[in-house]
Image: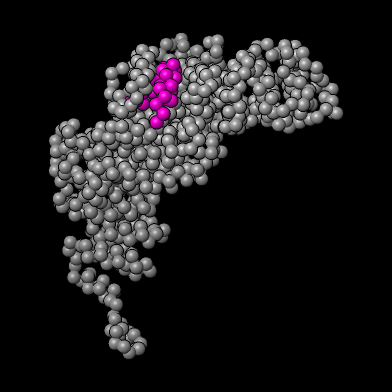
Amino acid sequence: MLSTAPRQPGRALIAGLALVPAMMALPAILVSVPSLTAAEGGDRNLPLPDQIRDLLAEGVRQYRIGRYGDSANTFRKAVQLEPEHRLVYEFYLACGEPLLLAMEAKNELDDVLKDLRRRANIYRKDLHSDPKYIELMISKLNEGEDVRIAAQYELIAIGPRAVPHLVAKIGDNRQDNLRVSSRIVLTRMGYRAVLPLIAALDSSDQRLVATVAAVLADIGDPRARPALKRVAEHPEGDATTKQVAANALAEIARRSGADATAEPQALYLAEALRYFRGGEAIRDEVVANESLVWRWVESQAGGPAAQLTSVKVARYAWNELIAEELLHLGMRAFPTHAPFQPLLAAVLAAQAAEAENRGILAKESTTPANGPDERSDAIAERIAALAELPDRIRMAGPERLYRAFDLCVRSERYDAAALILRLLQDKALAQPARHLPGSGLPLEKAGSSLVAALEHPEKLVRYEAAITLGHLDPAAEFTNRGKVVTALADAVGESGLRVVLVVDPDFRSRNQARAILQARGFHATTAADGHACLQRLRETPIVDAIIISGELLPTLRGAHGEAIDVPEQTAPGLVGLLRSDTRTAGTPIFISLPEHPELAIRVKAGFEAKAGAPAAGKPIEFLAKPFVSEAVAGALDLALRDAQAPQANRDLAESLALRAALALAQPDPERTGLDLPAAVPALILTLENRRNELRIAACQALSVIARHPAGSGVVKAQAEKLCALYTLQDNELPAAVRAALIGAIGVADPTLPAAVQILRRALKHDDLSVRSAAHLAIGHAERIDDELLSDLQRQQRLDVRSPGSGVAAKAAPTP
């Protein structure tokens, strides 16, 4: 109840908390509070906090009698007085969530009440992180029923941060009432309490472990199964504790339908793999657990409340860090279980790749960071901390790394797969003769996954596999060998990858769209609903086009089953959010229409009716279902015809092209079984309007290919083209690119008239590297006319007669 009496912060909060169970009765109570109207402006003789309380109470009263505009003005007057966040939080507690939601539903009140809610949430967040406040709430569990129930609700709302304090109480047999109440809170907190409770199972206090196991049984969450199974089967564990853990496992299996006979090492592996793969459920867990990672530190002084420790981690890294924690727990208990190691390598690779990608995106971002972990300085800090992670991945050795690559590909963690392949480009580490298959794709050969990747539908996987095989250049024949150079040539030609996001609740439609897009050279990502779509854009905001199902329907429900109005739940609402975001305001958006004709007409008409609205933004296009490859590709090509790929996508494409060109220069041209000459046309094309590093690498690759038994003639056939390209760019070529092009002309045919003119000028160039390249180019000629060589030698004569004589003399004129 709001009053005009001065109050102490702690007592006021508890008074508000005590009202929570009776929230539905609060509106009437608030109306009965004596207060001044907004028009009267409040009593200036009252202390400022009391003036604010009066205005807030008056705003509620006006809402109750239907004067919504007056109510909004009164609330705004309260906000103009700059109330402390603590005071606004008292108002929030006194009103309760149902009343606030009802008031926010009125258009007149929506903005001002959201502002009040924001201020209340700031104070609430600070309180929920304060151990003293948590202990205060726990102490209220010993009080009367109303206060006890209110404290339970508040502790549940605090969530995981309250768990260490509650765990300390459930293990304290000196206070039975508090112990029981704390256990009730943990049980009602449910899935948000599970991860810290699992960490508490590492305690050496067997009585506490048994109590925690019993709470986990009450919650019934399958995530506890690996740790409970380990406790139940521990050879040195307490018999009573083991029995409680076994009973908890049986109860969880009964409630969830999980296999009660699974081995603990298999459970650890499956759970770690689930976190590694991510998904919608994992994203929900990140939010529910406030991106905290838990660990029991037995040596920590201060009892269970201090021993159950947490660390706030980057949200984007949370699932990989949880997977890593699970694997280390599994390895500690079952060190000989072989499947742990490949998955650990994959998880570490995912951590490194994720941070690297975040760093690239942060440099291009033009919008404020969504949180402290997305700031460029925070990302740079993480990248620096992970600098030695590749060395830890190398420790796994070749066979496990090939298995890790396979796990990454199967889990669609292509960024992690690419990082592992970059490590495997080291022949000493990869040991291709030992691990790559000679023929077929036998499972016993770990390198079969690398060879099989040459046929993967996702072109990024094909490119990375080809680049790695180019570096390894296996001596023996192997399946798909003919596809290596084809993929490298395609990668060299990449100038800007196109990324399309598909949002569709039907997994069959998502898979069909992805297959079509991949076959057409697009990189496809998918989301099942609008929430996942926005999450994808937070993770990877660089997309070229978005396809949204017109059949998106609301899925969020309130306590009474009513639909909660969240814009991203429907196609029109999601489009509106995307158009209001500067990152996607100009992105082409396609609405996929339902297969049912009447429903398709209705969906299309709904969007077309909004097309003329002032804030409609860029027009949307429509695609029919089921998707037809030609129609989808044609619509995307038309929409993206004049659009430039985002800088991050261009950088990725240029990086791939550069690494592909470098890979083409790695094989021994006189012994390789790779058809290197097939890449020559693609390499020639890169010499026009591409980045300097790529042009240099392409020239180096041409020099290598010219030594291939079948490559000399292929490269020589490009001599005139090389000379023409050089002449066209002569005035703007940097020295390094000029030297590389001269080297390519030398291995092609330096005796062509155009080549001779180029070389004559290059021999006199100011830059030493250019002059050296020209000399070497002349030496590369298969056959050069003596008269021409004599002429060039006279031109280049150093005439070093006097240097070294010890006598200073004028240089004699050259005859």
**Does the image show residue 704?**
yes
Return the residue nearer the eye: 57 or 349.
57
Return the residue nearer the eye: 643 or 251.
251
> How many callouts does the rendering have?
0
Please report the residue visible at 28 percent of the width from the left and 44 percent of the height from the top: 395
**Chief secondary structure of the magenta span?**
helix
Please state the horizontal and vertical placement of residue 221, each as a whole percent of the image: 41, 19
Q: How is the image coloured?
A: one colour
**Does the image show residue 115?**
no
The quadrant of the picture occupied by the C terminus is bottom left
Q: Is residue 92 left or right of residue 3?
A: left
Q: Quadrant of residue 134?
A: top right
User: Is 180 included in the stretch rendered in magenta?
Assistant: no
Q: Quadrant of residue 295?
A: top left
From this view, report whether residue 42 is shown above or below residue 671: above
Please state the horizontal and vertical placement of residue 351, each as a whole percent of the image: 39, 38
Please state the horizontal and vertical placement of residue 634, each as a whole percent of the image: 39, 28
The quadrant of the picture occupied by the N terminus is top right
Return the residue nearer the eye: 520 or 781.
520
User: Is 215 included in the stretch rendered in magenta?
Assistant: yes
Please report the residue visible at 59 percent of the width from the left and 24 percent of the height from the top: 139
Please report the residue visible at 65 percent of the width from the left and 27 percent of the height from the top: 120
Please report the residue visible at 39 percent of the width from the left and 50 percent of the height from the top: 691
Please state the horizontal and vertical placement of residue 690, each as a whole percent of the image: 38, 49
Bounds of the magenta segment: 204-231
Q: Is residue 29 left or right of residue 488?
A: right
From this view, report whether residue 359 is shown above or below residue 36: below
